[in-house]
Amino acid sequence: MSFSDLIYPFEWIVAWILYGWHTLFTTLGIPSASGVAWTLSIVGLVVVMRAAMIPLFVRQIHASRRMQLIQPEMQKIQAKYKDKKDPDSRQAMTQETMDLYKRTGTNPFSSCLPILLQSPFFFGLFRVLNGLKKISDGTTDPIGPISRKLAGEAEASTFFGAQLSDRFIGANSLTVQIVTVVLIIAMSASTFTTQRQLMMKNMPASALDNPFAKQQKMLLYLMPIFFAISGVNFPIGVLLYWLTTNVWSMCQQFYVIRNMPAPGSQAEKAMQERRRKKGKPVEEFTVKGLDKPTDEAEAPKPSGQRVQPSRNKKKKGAAAKPATKATAKPAKAPSATTDPKPQTDN
């Protein structure tokens, strides 16, 4: 199965969402072939996709908070096996880490789910916009409800004078290049703002020195370069989608930092202070199972339950021992080596 076959269902879904929003805007009186209708349809696509992923985003937030709280335990495990490179030690370290994840209900991959699920739709939109000209020319078949007529309208629609299907590389006008550069700068600025407020306000001081925080800081400055390199290859419609989802992420992150801050961060202290001023109770986020020992065999409760019955049994056995001997002695049968004299007394 080729990549085109795998991505086609997402192209079909993207086409239907675009068509739905476009129909709504044209019903409201916006011309069908205008760039406004198709630009707002792309924005609507982002709204639908990100709204559908809100439950996953909530899981991502809880997973991120748990990951930050279990960092001290993770560092203890890493320090324990720091100088041990043999396979058994590495396996033991992995096992203890997985046990920590299991008993605290932490899934390190939950934070990646929104990005992973969004990627197919991103490529689906790219292929829809990239194939508009071929659909309008009749070279390829329509995608879902995007007929030849609608494909021609979308192909000819413009955003500040640049067609939605145009890209920086191969552009025939300066307008396309200017619009592309402006969109890339806006994308970079929104991503930089989102990551910076995450690191400055929503990360505890202890978490700023771990490898994950260093990677985040590196990405903070590498993302603009990534956008500049990749953005020149994407159609303007895809850049609009990218910018809109970045703005959504920035606003969403602002809400989360204010209302669901990470434990030990400046944002959490600010939230607690606001709650105190309003006379509301201050609650701290805790992770169930974090206070349990790593090795369940070291827990005192099971060992106490096993020892206590054995002690009682010994005491009862000691008290019953003399009575058992007294009653059992007369009934004892003679052995084969017993003196035969008592047997002839009768």
Image (cartoon, helix red, strand yellow):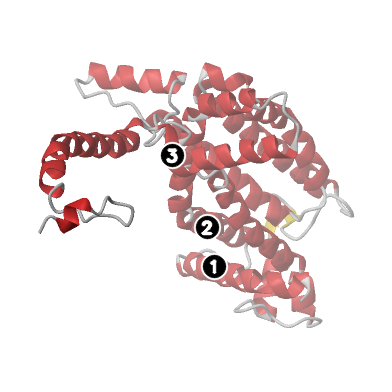
Q: Which residue position holds label 3?
A: 104
Circles 2 and 1, Cβ within 8 Å, touching? The answer is yes
- Quarter of the picture holding the C terminus: bottom left
**Could you say where residue 22 lies in the image, as x and y percent from the top left?**
54, 67
Asked whether 137 or 95 is in front, the reply is 95
- Judge depth for marks 2 and 1 and give the one in front: 2
Q: Relative to the observer, which residue lies in front, 12 or 44?
A: 12
Vertical order, 78 against 322 (above or below): above
The amino acid marked with disc number 3 is Thr
Label 3: which secondary element = helix
Q: Where is residue 322 in the image (x, y as percent from the top left)?
A: 14, 37
Q: Residue at x 73, y 66 (%)?
A: 127
User: Which element type, helix, strand or loop, lies under badge 2?
Assistant: helix
Left or right placement of residue 4 versus residue 308 in this view: right
Residue 159 appears anywhere in the view: no
- In the rendered image, residue 332, in percent from the top left (x then y), is placed at 19, 52
* Number of residues whose C-alpha sits closer than 10 Å to that of mark 1, classed few (under 14), some (14–19) or many (20 or more): many
Instruction: Decide which of 323, 73 is in the foreground and name it.
Output: 323
Give the class, few, some or many, for how many residues have Cα within 10 Å of label 3's Cα (few <14, many ≥20): many
For marks 2 and 3, give the one nearer the viewer.
Answer: 3
Q: Position of residue 20 (x, y in %)?
A: 51, 70
The label on residue 17 is: 1
186 on left or right of 342: right
* Amino acid marked by disc 1: Ile
Horizontal side of 256 relative to 222 (left or right) equals left
Image position of 104 with respect to 50: above or below: above
Residue pointed to by mark 2: 49
